[in-house]
Amino acid sequence: MECSKLNAKLIKIKAKVKGFLIIKKEKRNKPEQVIVIKKRNSILSTGFQNLLNAFQVYMSGATYKGKNANQAGIILTISPVQQITLPFASTPTISATENSAIITFSALDTSEDSYTATSEQLVTTSAGYNIPIATANITVTKNSDEILSFTWIITISLSIPPCIKYIPTTSPQSGGTNCNAFYGSNPCYSCKISSANSLYQGYSSSCTLVGLSSQYPQTNFITTQLFTDIFYNNYTKPSLNMFTQVNGTTIVIYTMYCMPYFFVGIENNSGVFASFSNNNEITCFSYSGSMSPEVEPIYFQVYFQNETQQYIGVQIEFTI
């Protein structure tokens, strides 16, 4: 059952990815002597597709088939046979506006080495893989008495339709449900469309909405974290499921209609999908080993009252 072959009810979102690199050079112990260089980077099309491939790994248990570099960080090319990898100085930072998601990578060279770098490459981590995603061609010379700092900023500009609310989140936010009774790794019996039952491996009862789901009941919403987690995460591979599809630079995240609420997020360090009904307080979910599919971060929530819309979810079309 491929998404491309479904007459699905999907919320369609467009996302434009761009970025630039800032290099700052300063004299050691003389911070007033600073040179700043900025340049727009080039997003690697194959690198971005590898990122989406890795997204499927931690969301759907797929097999990663892309490139895996030795280390994450910013790679400087010194000569045709010499490169320097500067590890990230800290975990990448996240910021957001009302229509964008921004992730910033920083690296620092405080050594007494002298060299001239002619190009730079950004290598990020996703689902345990180190993936080159962007390049820049800035020539910068470092002397032994100088410090170089690199700030690589990736911006995802979003076109969100009126039917879904974008919630800018700069830190992981919880959502989904909290439940009192857990029925283990058994197929859900509560789905109104019987063929959807097997998509969920567990179910719980006496459930209530939590986190953003409780703040925005009966609402479609999507958070910053979905977009920034694609570019950097430390998540792991769950059991194989069929809730996502990547085709080129388009992601579809969906399920068959089960109950009015549909949540997607991370629990136990990998992707979780859940469906919930306020009427009977039942939650059906892809099994993650716990009794309550309370996800943190929550990526999105879709609310469909009408079960005649058989398939629900979101489609995100990225351009670079």
Image (cartoon, grey):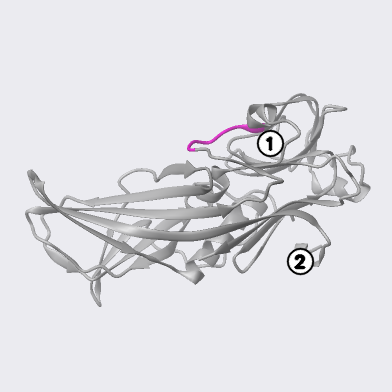
Choose top left, top right, bottom left or bottom right for residue 52. bottom right
Magenta-span inclusion, residue 249: no
Amino acid type of disc 1? Gly
Q: Toward the viewer: 63 or 29? A: 29
**236 displayed left or right of 62:** left
Residue 30, x across and y down, in percent: 7, 45
Task: Write the start and end of the magenta stretch as one range.
Answer: 170-175
Q: Is residue 223 above or below residue 21?
A: above
Amino acid type of disc 2? Ser
Q: Which residue is mark 1?
A: 289
Q: Nearer the viewer, mark 1 or mark 2?
A: 2
First in residue order: circle 1 vs circle 2:
2
Q: Toward the viewer: 87 or 40? A: 40
Q: Secondary structure at mark 1?
A: loop
Quadrant the N terminus occupies: bottom right
Q: Which residue is mark 2?
A: 4
Residue 193, x across and y down, in percent: 92, 46
- Residue at (50% x, 70% y) in the render: 45
Residue 204, x across and y down, in percent: 79, 30
**136 displayed left or right of 187:** left
Q: Count the marks.
A: 2
Residue 267, x across and y down, in percent: 62, 38
